[in-house]
Amino acid sequence: MKYSSVIVEDLQTAADFLRKFCERSGLVEVQAHFLNAEDALNYLSENLVDLIFLDVEMPGATGFDLMDRLVYTPQVILTTSKTEYAYDAFQYNVTDYLKKPFTYQRFLEALQKVQVKKEEEDSSSERDHIFIKSDGKLIRLKNDDILFIESMGDYVKFVTAEKKYITHNTIKNLETKVDPLRFMKVHRSYIVNLSRIDDIQENSLYIKGTMIPISKAHKARVMQKLNIV
Amino acid sequence: MMKGSPQEIYQFSSHFDHQFLNELYGDDMRSAEEVFHSALIQIDQEVSEAEKLFREKNFTEVRKIFHRIKPLFGYVGLMEVQDNIQQFEDNCIHFRDIGSLELAFENVKTIVWEASVKISEEKGKLSDYNKQRA
């Protein structure tokens, strides 16, 4: 799997090097490059990325301003030519701090830190929510609040007790994104929150009165997962 | 070894940090030539803009321009120029009087101009080298 990323950098030469390094590593896909923080924020308010390569001093807002205004927390590698920002970088808990110009070897070391942090986050109990893109913005949904996710062709519907959110995605893709300890695919069109199942009858389960089919292919695994005494 | 044979390794001139440049570019001297070329153009444009802003006494923006172009000197292996520019950036923030800042500005422009001459010469060398291999 590649890390999705954006480059926020006002020096084109530096951005070109970063893009080349990302391509060469085969580990990072650069979705976009922005010359200032405002344009990057507009993009990031509607698009999720795993990683931001972020310059500090740019025209207008700084890289730190951008981090203050992000609604979610991707990993950040600061790229700057000034070592004085190291303390602030530490305060912002950035993954790494690259002083420009840097070599490909140093870039790879930073990517290793990204990988370690990602593994830590994935195994952490703090991963209690996901972000979905709906109505042109990113919405934070707590895992506890999601009852189930239903396929609607090229879209999916996230159902909570309060509201339904429709977003452009697929069950197949979401299967790898949701917390596997909490969510489970029970049918090609449904992922359910295991802790919100009220009852199970034959080949169906019920959550808050909604019947959800369990496919033959998934039934054995579903029964294994449940705490049946 | 024959001049221009594919095995010949490009040698950067002694002004440049060739160890760093070799790490950065490997044997891709076409990329090196492109970067030297674009650095020259950008440095020229940005310093002209800085001169205009300096005359307007907009020292904050002057500092930002030098901050932006500082890494360019790193990408061409002139590390000490980055240190000189950092010094000038600090001067822009902590200057005592306009006179001392004017002096610092003239000084940094001279350093940048001398560096640009070296970059231009090296860019010519790189261009010749790449043409031989075309």
Image (spheres, grey):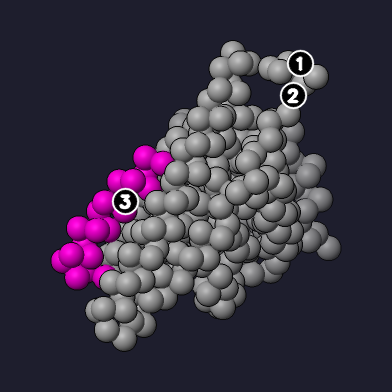
* Mark toward the start of the polypeptide (1 vs 2): 1
* Quarter location, residue A24: top right
Closer to the camera in the image, B121 or B52: B121
Please check whether the numbered discs 3 and 1 fall on a single chain: yes
Residues at marks 1 and 2 touching, judged by CB atoms closer than 8 Å: yes
* Mark toward the start of the polypeptide (3 vs 1): 1
Q: Position of residue A42 (x, y in %)?
A: 33, 52
* Mark toward the start of the polypeptide (2 vs 3): 2
Q: Which mark is residue A33?
A: none
Q: Which mark is residue B46?
A: 3
Does A108 sit left or right of A156 as displayed? right
Chain containing mark 1: B
* Quarter location, residue B85: bottom left
In the rendered image, the vertical position of residue A15 relative to residue A94, given as above or below: above
Q: Which mark is residue B2?
A: 1
Give, as a single range, the part of the protein colored magenta.
B39-59
**Is any atom of residue A132 visible in this view?**
no
How much space separates mark 1 and mark 2, taking CA atoms?
8 Å
Chain containing mark 3: B
**Is any atom of residue A113 visible in this view?**
yes
Q: Which residue is mark 2?
A: B8
Please check whether the numbered discs 2 and 3 fall on a single chain: yes
Amino acid bearing label 2: Glu
Does A217 sit left or right of B101 as displayed? right
